[in-house]
């Protein structure tokens, strides 16, 4: 079976973020960048004193040290204009436009619309006649306007009424002609979940009444959990940890095919990023939630960075929910995602989080348990780092390639494990060719369960193709020794709905 893939958003955005966004954040030991800033300030002073040639010289030195900063190019362009050196002015201006434009695109990819808007306004200033950037600026202005409006009408978090509390799903009629799965009474049974998965496989929807019932029941259950959940696996039993699924429902079914359905005897932990990117996120999340409602100890769920409003707005889940369910569900899912726990510990030995470890040493499990997690992910602090951080091969800590969280070395991992008397960190969050990667002297494993992620890997190589992309993986632990047994698997075919089919238009504009 062959599919066509029209665009590759992710690698583009990733590159842009890596190159343009994060370099200015490298305050740790990057003297070139701060020296470049000093030079720019001197250049600005020279400019103000009308010493344009001197200003140009200083801007050039700054550019020499950091060519990524659009401001340097823009300012040097102005200085050239003052000297009537229009050729050089235009050259510098186009460099500046490129810089602002790419940083703006990266801000959009992170959901930072206001920052993106500022950059596109600069682009507009520098190239007032460019129709393409004018269009993007307009889209961005619309988004910021909408955000401002939403902020204006938003009630403070503490006073906000829960959407969940306002829904009475029992009052919703199920039409007799509805042929899909039905929940009888209050109990979600295996029979129901199987029928629902069958319906999903055939691209049929679940009735809203039952979708509400599942999500609301899930909320009650998750709210009662601590932010760090301890799991006890009895001797002789096993336990499976999966990484990101990202809306790839057909690959999720394949995991169940290979490793059995979730049950008390065959429990799973899904380690965040259930939704976004893949175009079957609604099917994935309802399936995982339904299993948890059926048997709370059959499946554990932890929050990923994509279980958040800002990510869901851009990477497809919000649009998909609106299209397959309703606007109310958008709010409802956002509320329930805020109840997901952040970390799990298996048999007091294996620490499992979506992203990774912390910007400070000495964090104890009790600190994680104490996190007040019932909110959108903050931009810094333990909760942000749990959801966003990545390991790095070098020791110590470094800036994040994503612009959020940090990267941490093997020494950080070892100290954390020692401080908490643990053996292993398992995390997800990054696509890996083999579906997993073992790092930090075997003390840290990345597991990623979305094979052929975004259907992207083989486009880069082949233009199109059969499942030639990354593999997916899951880890099976057997108690009591808790050695990780890694199983990898390839992608299975799915109906021809492209990844990101429901994603925000902005991303497509930049692809
Ligand atoms: C150059 O850069 C700075 C930003 O640091 C800006 O505020 C300043 O007005 C710019 N222009 C000139 C001509 O100095």
Image (cartoon, rainbow, N blue to C red):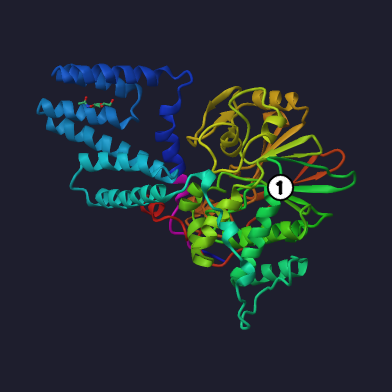
Residue found at the far bottom of this picture: 177
Image quarter hosting the N terminus: bottom right
Q: Is residue 58 above or below residue 147?
A: above
Q: Residues within 10 Å of mark 1 (few under 14, many from 20)?
A: few
Residue found at the far left of this picture: 84
Q: How many marks?
A: 1
Query: Which residue, given by chain and number where applicable, does mark 1 sit on?
Result: 224
Is residue 233 rendered magenta in the image? no
Is residue 493 in view from this perspective? yes
Q: Nearer the viewer, residue 249 or 311?
A: 311
Q: Secondary structure at mark 1?
A: loop
Q: Give percent across and percent down for residue 22.
A: 44, 32
Report the predominant secondary structure element of the magenta stretch: loop
Q: Nearer the viewer, residue 274 or 160?
A: 160
Is residue 57 in view from this perspective? no
Q: Quadrant of residue 251?
A: bottom right
Residue found at the far right of this picture: 236
Q: Is residue 461 left or right of residue 269?
A: left
Picture residue at 66% right of the left edge, 46% below the top:
302
Q: Nearer the viewer, residue 227 or 476?
A: 227
Which stretch did the figure color magenta?
4-12
- Which corner quadrant of the figure contains ligand 1? top left
Q: Give percent across and percent down for residue 458.
A: 53, 53
Q: Is residue 11 left or right of residue 267?
A: left
Picture residue at 17% right of the left edge, 32% below the top:
89
Picture residue at 20% right of the left edge, 19% below the top:
55
Picture residue at 40% right of the left edge, 45% below the top:
108
Is residue 8 rendered magenta in the image? yes
Q: Give percent across and percent down for residue 97.
A: 27, 38
Q: Give percent across and percent down for residue 237.
A: 87, 48
């Amino acid at each position: 079976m062959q599919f066509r893939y029209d665009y590759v958003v992710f690698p583009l955005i990733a590159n842009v973020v890596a190159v343009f966004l994060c370099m200015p954040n490298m305050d740790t030991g990057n003297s070139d960048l701060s020296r470049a800033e000093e030079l720019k300030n001197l250049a600005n002073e020279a400019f103000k004193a009308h010493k344009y040639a001197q200003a140009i010289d200083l801007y050039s030195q700054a550019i020499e040290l950091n060519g990524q900063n659009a401001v340097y190019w823009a300012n040097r362009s102005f200085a050239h204009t003052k000297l009537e050196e229009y050729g050089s002015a235009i050259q510098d201006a186009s460099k500046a436009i490129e810089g602002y434009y790419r940083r703006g695109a990266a801000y959009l990819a992170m959901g930072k619309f206001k920052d993106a808007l500022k950059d596109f306004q600069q682009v507009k200033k520098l190239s007032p006649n460019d129709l393409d950037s004018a269009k993007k600026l307009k889209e961005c202005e619309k988004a910021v306007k909408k955000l401002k409006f939403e902020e204006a009408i938003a009630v403070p978090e503490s006073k906000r009424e829960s959407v969940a509390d306002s829904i009475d799903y029992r009052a919703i009629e199920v039409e007799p002609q509805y042929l899909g799965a039905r929940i009888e009474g209050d109990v979600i049974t295996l029979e129901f979940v199987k029928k629902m998965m069958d319906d999903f496989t055939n691209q049929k929807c679940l009735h809203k009444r039952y979708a509400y019932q599942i999500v609301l029941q899930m909320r009650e259950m998750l709210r009662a959990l601590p932010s760090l959940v301890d799991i006890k696996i009895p001797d002789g039993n096993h336990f499976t940890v999966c990484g990101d699924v990202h809306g790839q429902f057909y690959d999720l079914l394949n995991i169940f095919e290979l490793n059995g359905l979730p049950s008390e005897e065959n429990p799973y932990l899904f380690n965040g990023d259930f939704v976004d990117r893949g175009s079957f996120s609604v099917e994935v999340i309802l399936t995982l939630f339904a299993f948890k409602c059926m048997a709370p100890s059959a499946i554990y769920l932890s929050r990923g960075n994509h279980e958040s409003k800002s990510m869901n707005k851009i990477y497809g889940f919000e649009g998909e929910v609106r299209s397959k369910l309703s606007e109310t569900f958008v709010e409802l899912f956002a509320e329930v995602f805020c109840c997901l726990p952040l970390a799990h510990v298996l048999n007091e030995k294996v620490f499992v989080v979506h992203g990774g470890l912390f910007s400070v040493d000495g964090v104890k499990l009790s600190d994680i348990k104490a996190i007040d997690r019932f909110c959108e992910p903050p931009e810094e602090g333990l909760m942000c780092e749990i959801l966003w951080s990545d390991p790095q091969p070098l020791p110590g800590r470094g800036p994040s390639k994503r612009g959020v969280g940090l990267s941490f070395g093997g020494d950080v991992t070892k100290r954390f494990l020692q401080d908490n008397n643990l053996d292993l960190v398992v995390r997800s969050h990054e696509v890996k060719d083999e579906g997993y990667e073992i790092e930090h002297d075997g003390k840290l494993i990345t597991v990623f369960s979305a094979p052929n992620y975004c259907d992207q890997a083989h486009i880069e190589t082949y233009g199109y193709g059969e499942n030639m992309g990354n593999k997916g993986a899951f880890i099976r632990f057997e108690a009591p020794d808790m050695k990780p047994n890694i199983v990898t698997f390839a992608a299975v075919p799915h109906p021809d709905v492209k990844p990101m089919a429901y994603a925000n238009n902005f991303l497509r504009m930049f692809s």
